[in-house]
Amino acid sequence: MADIDEKKEKDFAPHIPQKAELFFLKGSNSLDWGMKNRLARIFNPTTGRTVMLAFDHGYFQGPTSGLERIDLTILPLIPYADSLMLTRGILRAVIPASTPQSIVLRVSGGTSILKELSDEGLAVDIEEAIRLNACGLAVQVFIGGEHERETILNMTKMVNLGTRFGLPTLAVTAVGKEMARDARYFRLATRICAELGAHFIKTYYVEEGFETVTASCPVPIVIAGGKKIPEREALRMAYRAIQEGAAGVDMGRNIFQAENPEAMIQAVRAVVHQNETPEKAFSLYQDLSHQKKGKRQKK
């Protein structure tokens, strides 16, 4: 039996109304507590943005450049990321269980670069994602692709399963070789994914009209880094995307294939969370690179 509360006067503070705090991510306020909590581990609640480190490329490309030895190239980068996007195989085999960063798990797959990439299915079930303590589920969607319908339904199935257990779904918009990469296409692709339940969306940045893509999408958008480009250009792309409404980046090759990956991810982080200009971020990248070279020379 609980002890009797002997305090005579209690302070219920009836003059102070209980606050109903709005969730910081757009389109997410009506989600359940567990879903919001996982999103708040992917996105920084202070800035409302995220630096996701993507290294799931091996699920269809194999050991691509920079990912030959994930234990050597990726582990040093993890402290600078908010969230990690990867496959369950790499998560179990390489990533320490003590890692505090949130996990966005690649759950679609089934084809390689030798075949039609849009012919994907769901490769991970929801119980496995829960067992691995994932905070998000990443599904590739090929709007306009040969297997468009199947990939859209892959996403909606994962949305249904994820919602049942409180895991948000990330729709990853893929672009076929013959598709135009313009704002009109990405407005179509991102809006379809959002309308069908995706909780946040990964898509590509475009030079013209990207602000219309983010404005017409009712859930957060993070940009893909895409193919490797010079570091200064990658930082400029990240900056413009953030200023035009993106809620973060999900970069891979433009970080782990950089000349100095540790310096690059810190420069990207400065752009995303501190609104640093591309010029200052690139200067930071150079300074950090020089510091690392200096330490090597001393050894």
Image (cartoon, rainbow, N blue to C red):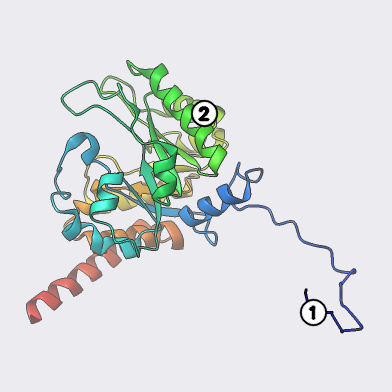
Which quadrant holds residue 208?
top left
Q: Where residue 119 sits: x, y (%)?
A: 30, 21
Mark 2: few/some/many CA within 10 Å (<14, 14-19, 20+):
many
Q: In the picture provided, is 122 more to the left or to the right than 273?
A: left
Front-most of 162 and 226? Answer: 162
Asked whether the beta carbons under mark 2 and mark 1 sit within 8 Å of each other, the answer is no
The residue positioned 47% from the left and 24% from the top of the image is: 188
Which quadrant holds residue 149?
top left
SS class of the residue under badge 1?
loop
Which quadrant holds residue 113?
top left
The residue positioned 87% from the left and 84% from the top of the image is: 7
Q: Where residue 274 sits: x, y (%)?
A: 45, 63
Number of numbered discs present?
2
Front-most of 68 and 180? Answer: 68
Front-most of 229 and 81? Answer: 81
Disc 1 marks which residue? Answer: 3
Q: Where residue 273 sits: x, y (%)?
A: 45, 60
N-terminal label among 2 and 1: 1
Mark 1: few/some/many CA within 10 Å (<14, 14-19, 20+):
few
* In the depicted structure, whether residue 145 falls above or below residue 200: above
Q: In the picture provided, is 40 more to the left or to the right than 103?
A: right
Disc 2 marks which residue? Answer: 191
Q: Where residue 76 sits: x, y (%)?
A: 24, 64
